[in-house]
Amino acid sequence: MATDSKVTWLPLESNPDVMNKFIRNLGVPASWQLVDVLGLDPELLQMVPQPVLAVLLLFPYNDKIGLEIAKEDESADKAPTSDLYFIKQTISNACGTIALIHALANNVERIQLDADKSLKKFIDATKTLAPVEKAKILEVNEEICSAHKQHAQEGQTSTPNPEEPVSLHFVTLVNVDNFLFELDGRKTSAVNHGATTEATFLEDAAKVCKKFIERDPEEVHFSVVALTAAQGDN
């Protein structure tokens, strides 16, 4: 969705086919993939390949939900961890790419990123910087910007005008040091949702997704994708 930045990108669809092409372009090996999560009930979660490294939630950012999120941002548990990678969103409509960076950068020990590709270089160069400093470097990263633009035009819906406001927003849920963190580039920092494990992460993340949905039960524009092992055997 939009920010106050003068830098504006086309929005990225919540479409695993598009996202997988994008992350391959950035240097993610074929052993990891993004898949649709068809529902948040236990029987549907069991259909998602394991292990799950991250969950990306796309949700409507209307006035009602925005107010609730602002209140939560002020009161949330933001206990930091030295291993957490968090980047602010300063580029309008870049939340999809920010969400993917959060998913991948917080799992670099599991995902063998191509050292010659742009994402590994970006993460290595920015991992010790403050969230806003990371964001400023992303604004001028031509390779990631070009890859985003290419794949944002490949979705199933018509390509929007980048200047038009977008009312949908991505956040990422990850397990770092056995705590479930919500990473939202529009917030001041990561939000700690409590303890988790690799075995329970998807179920715990689904509970957080349900809380987003409960903010405005009449809304239907929610979708969830997961970053998983391609064959479920990594």
Image (tube, rainbow, N blue to C red):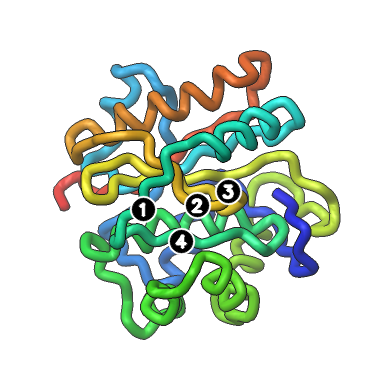
Task: Check contact, mark 2 vs mark 1: CB within 8 A.
Answer: yes
Q: CA distance from mark 4 to mark 1?
A: 18 Å
As rendered, which of 31 and 66 lies closer to the eye? 66
> Residue drawn 50% across and 38% down?
57
Identify residue type, mark 3.
Answer: Lys
Q: CA distance from mark 2 to mark 3?
A: 6 Å
Task: Check contact, mark 2 vs mark 3: CB within 8 A.
Answer: yes
Decide which of tag 4 and tag 2 comes sooner along the chain.
4
Task: Check contact, mark 4 vs mark 2: CB within 8 A.
Answer: no
Q: Is residue 147 visible?
A: no
Residue 29 against residue 124 in the figure, above or below: above
> Residue drawn 66% across and 63% down?
90
Write down the residue under mark 1.
80
Residue 133 against residue 189 in the figure, above or below: below
Tag of residue 187: 3
Q: Is residue 142 left or right of residue 107?
A: right
Numbered disc 3: secondary structure: loop
Q: CA distance from mark 4 to mark 3?
A: 16 Å
Q: Position of residue 143 (x, y in %)?
A: 56, 80
Tag of residue 189: 2
Identify residue type, mark 4.
Answer: Ile
Identify residue type, mark 1.
Answer: Pro
**Crowdedness of circle 4 by 10 Å Cα count: few (<14), some, many (20+)?**
many
Q: CA distance from mark 2 to mark 1?
A: 9 Å
Q: Is residue 199 left or right of residue 31?
A: left
Write down the residue under mark 4.
101
**Crowdedness of circle 1 by 10 Å Cα count: few (<14), some, many (20+)?**
few
